[in-house]
Image (cartoon, coloured by chain):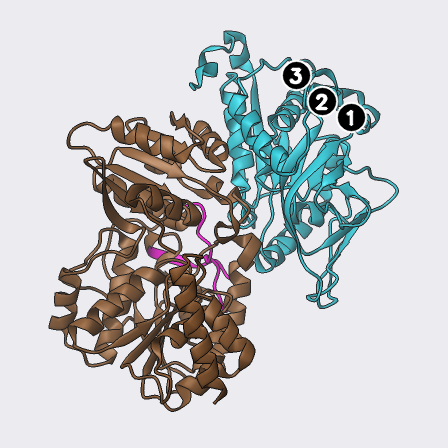
Amino acid sequence: MINVISIILGKAIAYLSNVLNIGSGSTWPGHIALKLNPNFIKGILKNSKTKIIVIAGTNGKTTTGRLITSIIRESGKTYLQNKAGANLINGLASALVKGVELTGPLNKDYLIFESDESALPEVLEQTNPDYLICLNLFRDQLDRYGEVNTIAKNWQEAFEKLNSKTTLILNSDDPQVSFLSKKTNATILFFGLDETNGENNLKHGADSIYCPHCLHMLDFTQVHFSHLGTWSCSNCSLKRPKPELSNLIYYPLPGTYNKYNSLAAALFAKAENISFKKVIRAYKSFTPAFGRQEKIKYRGKFAHLFLSKNPTSFNESLETIKKLHGKNLLIILNDRIPDGLDVSWIWDINFEGILDKSFNIMVSGERCYDMGLRLKYAEIFTHIEPNLENAIDVTVEGLEKKEELFILPNYSAMLDARKILTGKKIL
Amino acid sequence: MKNNQLSSYTLDANRYSLTIGWLYPDLMNTYGDRGNIITLIKRCQWRGIKVEVKRLNPGFNHKQLTICNMLVMGGAQDIQQEIVGEDLKKKNKILKQMINDGTPGLFVCGGFQFLGKYYKEADGTIVNGLGIFDLYTENPGENHPRLIGNIAIKFNIDILRASDSESRSSFSTSSNSKNVIIGFENHGGRTYLGKNIKPFGKVLKGFGNNGKDGFEGAVYKNSFGTYLHGPILPKNPELADHLIKLSLIRKYKEFTLDPLDDTIEKKAKDTILNRLKIQNSPNSS
């Protein structure tokens, strides 16, 4: 009964916040439902046949979630998913409040939940998922999340409580993520990338370069980016496990990081016995999630949004834009709470190694002078315009006929830019 | 905005060179600390001073240290610090000698803690430090919050005046806004200074060494220890220049640094000073 009240109240709040346009409708209803009944989530999920998929990792959660929903749709099944950004426990509860009928269990085939790194242990405890996908672990918002090793340790402890009902889909190419397979009773599946680019040197900013078992320096015969690659330890003979899935005939988005996301989602499909044909069909009609390589038309020109929120995602955005022959960049740096207050990480971006003087660069955002300074020390010429609207307008006006603008914002900056480009708010 | 400093150096400067020893770059670089190295390199190069950076990773030959004119060390995660701690033990003697002899150095966060007597971890384990700085650090346990946030400190000129005559350089002679240093701190350990060491500065906004006594960092001879990331040098170019100048004076006896255009540096610094509601007035000393 208490859950019925929670749901009614939650739905009413969601409705009101939507009508009154006061935002945060994606976390409030769940917050209240959990206040009324701390076991709200468990109660809803207990009697349902819905399969639960939890997605975790520093980079790629939203895109992977969207790839999975595209596959589920293609296979004619139904799903419920948390709103982007609402990835703490109250976001999960909110998704349930909105998606569930007043009486009876959850009536969908799948529940997909993108989990914040720090919330994952609690999410696992509440949901006991059928699938848990771990994409990667990179340094990100150290002031908020703590260090990579701390997160890995907390995950390890949470994974020890999983049983074989859960299929754990892990990235074999991330040493620390693949090592999470060692102390759990969950069923393990690995995805990785089997291709060579001739690179076997780690670049600056790689995090997990020491053996997660014995702390000896790892050897890499292939590095895709950061610390992802074919690795082994010469001291304790731990090595990259052989992945079940390591290449696809079609990838829906450019960028090596998106190959990993595509492989992870496809491996889930394989485990669910969804045909490979359906996966490729879903991928061929795939449109990106907001801000993740999203293309928006603005004043007759195209602007691409490449969410770039930590050193690894920034480096990979730059590499991908370079491959797409993008020359006009707008970098936007904010330091609000969802971004992390510390902008030190911009000094770990490899501007020197990726960009050259042929790029036309504008920087904006609340910490635009920090970014301008970073680029000054990379000896790359930049324009600085603190006012974002002006920065967008000036760069768009400066584009030649067929040129497109590539925007690299961090999280809140992406929301700001998107609002200007589309003329509306999204969250 | 153009880096036209490249053309401003005199040919004469070409005969000057510095070797910077970067201690454990593969391990102690968690918080963008390499920005400090980039800043030192560029601010030398823009003045025509040649720079070589020695990347000193675990297992390096200690003789490499002796050719360094300046030492830089950043912070890291616990596991990395354990690996570094083991390696540092073997270099303790030579490091101590260099720092005592007045080799300029910048030691941030973990690097700062290593120079002290010991570090007591959250679980009570004591990790011995190098004992070069008269200080110790204790992590009060997981129930105590980390000290995180933007920080501004007032640099105490008198410290430098007192330390030794060589140090009376850019800080004391330059005019405006040279006394406030800004950064971002993020540390669980609380550091307490002993009698034989002076603080790097006084906390204006933020936590500092332990969140209690109002002090930040430590200065001993020409070595600076601090919790300030950001990284510290790009937005505080006067400190970067101070380290460069100290190193050059030690090597060449006399040296005057050409000024550089620090407009963006100043604006980036002002962004934080405004956030912290600190007026960066020229007469603040």
Q: Secondary structure at mark 2?
A: helix
> Magenta residues: mostly which secondary structure?
loop
Q: Is residue A156 visible?
A: no
Relative vertical location of residue A246 with respect to residue B245 in this rendering, above or below: below
Tell me, yes or no, whether the two marked residues, 1 and 2, touch with CB atoms within 8 Å. yes
Q: Amino acid at mark 3?
A: Tyr
Residue on which disc 2 sits = B171
Q: Is residue A170 visible?
A: yes
A247 displayed left or right of A188: left
Specify whether disc 2 shares its chain with disc 3: yes
Residue on which disc 1 sits = B157
> Picture coordinates of residue A34 (x, y %)?
52, 77
Residue on which disc 3 sits = B252
Chain identity for the colour cyan used in the image: B
Quarter of image, res A365: top left
Relative vertical location of residue A76 with respect to residue B96 in this rendering, above or below: below
Chain identity for the colour brown used in the image: A
